[in-house]
Image (spheres, rainbow, N blue to C red):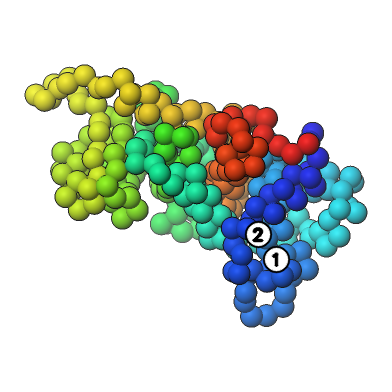
Amino acid sequence: MHNIHTNFIRIIDVLKDIFGDEISEKGNYLRRGSVPKFSDIELIALSLTAECLGIDSENYLFSKLNKEYLNDFENLISRRQYNDRRKLLFEKTEAVRKSMAECINEQADIFAIDSMPLEICKISREQRNKMGKESEHHSPDKDYCASQKKYFYGYKLHSVCSAADVIQSLDLTKASVHDVHYLKDVKELFSKCMIIGDKGYISRQQQINLFETAGIELEVPLRSNQKELKPTMWILKKVRKRIETVFSQLCDQFMMQRNYAKSFTGFKSRVLAKVTGLTVLQFLNKFIYNKPVDRVKHTHAD
């Protein structure tokens, strides 16, 4: 296991550079009321450090911190406080991810779009599942995943990724929400670029709408029964493969498919922490370690 405190310090330095005047000298976001001793920026950094080092269990993380790093984290909070505050800092964590992604993708004008299933339990257990059912709007449901050739119960992660393997935009929806619906959000977030998708994004109406309203050229492979059928350029296939690589990294290195959450708020915070953890490693590769952005397997501070 790589040194948690060394990596924590590296990440917290990056976060301070990103937020600058938005945080106080002690690392807290400006607000009324009592100021926590274990600062907001420290909590986000600890969360991202754990994800970057492949520590998927909060129980294991705090057990290790209390046994081996107690002197390094003087104001360490309890696991319960950590969990509650991480949920409250969801918007700030998303700001971290977005800021880093924009720095890496600054000149990007070609992106890939895709979605991945996030199963929270087997379909046979859906009636007993309570996670996410605190609100009808956030409750999970089931859908068919064509790539895996099976039905699943849970949610769907929609993402737009650059050719450099960096997720620029993401959204979490019920499993049954069709991929095409995410294109409505895309036109608000992107402009004058090319976005490459698979057959799940075939919609002539959406292609025209994206081009006319935001100057976005949506490239999708046509079905064999469509009159304008033409072979997809190999370079477009290569770019589209990049987002599949990112999804594989999230599942293998960041264990995205594991679910320990008991509420939708906890689930979305967990998903965001993993995507942000990946973005942190990519950011460090480009601006600190001078390595290829996509080589995140062994990115760490010794």
Mark earlier in primary sequence (2, 1): 2
The amino acid at mark 2 is Lys
Q: Residues within 10 Å of mark 2 (few under 14, many from 20)?
A: some
148 displayed left or right of 207: right
Q: Which residue is mark 2?
A: 16
21 displayed left or right of 5: left
| Contact flag, marks 2 and 1 (Cβ < 8 Å) | yes
The amino acid at mark 1 is Gly
Q: Nearer the viewer, mark 2 or mark 1?
A: 2
The answer to which of 179 and 246 lies nearer the viewer is 246
Whole-percent x, y for residue 208 in the image: 15, 44
Whole-percent x, y for residue 190 in the image: 33, 50
Work out whether residue 42 can be spotted.
Answer: yes
Work out whether residue 84 can be spotted.
Answer: no
Q: Which residue is mark 1?
A: 27
The answer to which of 261 and 285 lies nearer the viewer is 285
